[in-house]
Amino acid sequence: MSEELYVGTRKGLFILEQNEEDWSIKRHEFPGEPVSMIMPDPRDGMLYAALTHGHFGAKLHRSADSGESWEECGLPTYPETAETESVVAETTGEKPKGDSLEEIWAMEPGSGSRLWAGTIPGGLFYSDDQGTNWQLVESLWNDPQRPQWMGGGKDHAGLHSICVDPRNPDRITVAVSVGGVWQTNDGGTSWDLIGEGLRAEYMPPDQASSLLMQDPHLLVHCPASPDHMWIQHHNGIFRSENGGLNWSEITDVDPAVFGFAVAVHPDKPDLAWFVPAIKDETRIPFQGEFVVTRTQDGGKSFDKLTSGLPQNNAFDIVYRHALAVDPIGTTLAMGSTTGNLWISQNSGDDWKSISNHLPPVYCLKFNPTRN
Amino acid sequence: MIPTMPRVCFTPNLHKLVDVHEYEVAGSTIAQALEDVFSRQPTLQSYIVDDQKRLRRHINVFVDGELIRGAHPLNTEIRPESEIYIMQALSGG
């Protein structure tokens, strides 16, 4: 067995390889550039890396040789407003309006050759030519409720989660911070705002159950049982057994229900992992103890996993895309804002530090074609 | 008299990201000069302007050694012998 792991950080993409029990950094690509999303495509082996240049905007690159060489793709772009149809239009002196791509925050394979991308400001785009050309899903963009989406940790709302139902790729569920959970059953022609049971405690009490004002930090589904979904939400952990229509809140979790990341086992919908922190106002681990929580019974009980993780003076936060489980379901990887990278090869029971000196970790994914 | 054309140059930081060089361009405004460059190197466009064709927030333009400011910097008129220098603002970390 030899797995491969892609780690997107504030200062580039790291490609790690497993040799027996050891993991080592094999390559460092895009040095100095923030990598907001990485997607190894299991269908054709193409590897995509989304960059967010500080000065030059968000970009997308693809590699057909596992990261040895790269070419720049096309980009999701937002509709131009009428008064800014070209650079020359600026000569009219009219104030330009309209959205501009800040970040590619999610990428997922769809049906056929389709690629999906979620963005900040909150948009959903697709490409049918390996990222050369992108189209905006206008049905979602033009939904009358979409302008009410609002920024959470970012200035604009962002679409960070895309769950494509493996039984029916026209059924897609996406999550937006802050804009709730949306679902299409016709490949994106029409959308429903779903999520009964989600609760937003940061809203005025009479708005707490508003579907639109929910802040799911991450939405995942169990690939083998896609109706079983988990959300790590701004103020809690929620679980759905009917494809996201209804959610039950899970409140009894030591040390906390706040966090960003959630991963679910590929075959066992009741088995999920979270990385807790003190809620919202501080966003640091409880009492300097960095732990992972795991449920194996659908949220009825949780294990607090500490073996191999720092239990003193730890201030690591794991972002929403920085916890991943491999296709087998036993190896986990996790990267933190303080540049620590851990791997567990026994379902989270024990963790091994791979590096303590990386840049802040934004995202990581296992190569789905290697195991 | 040898006819001259405006020239557009780019910060070294951009050279590592996009294949750019110095361009002699047509046009009497910065916007027109950039349109000419983008037509020859389409990849460059999204690095300099955003989706709405606004100059990116962290991009500065110098014309003949002067930093161009104001609400619509791309409207600035240029002369046939002008040198336009595109650089990134000194921000970030």
Image (spheres, coloured by chain):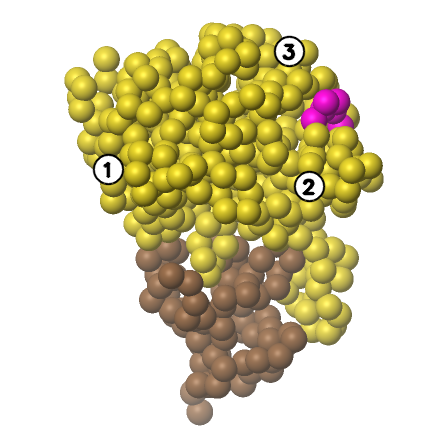
Magenta run includes residue A197: yes
The reply to the same-chain question for discs 3 and 1 is yes
Q: Colour of chain A?
A: yellow
Magenta run includes residue A25: no
Dot 3 crowding, Cα within 10 Å, few <14, some 14–19, many 20+? some
Mark 2: amino acid: Tyr
| A341 and A125: which is toward the camera | A341
Residue B20 position by quadrant: bottom left
Magenta stretch prevailing secondary structure: loop
Q: Which mark is residue A355?
A: 1
| Residue matched to label 3 | A241
| A272 and A286: which is toward the camera | A286
| Residue matched to label 2 | A202
Task: Name the subunit of mark 1.
Answer: A
Q: Which residues make up the magenta segment?
A: A193-198
Q: Tell me, yes or no, whether the two marked residues, 2 and 3, touch with CB atoms within 8 Å.
A: no
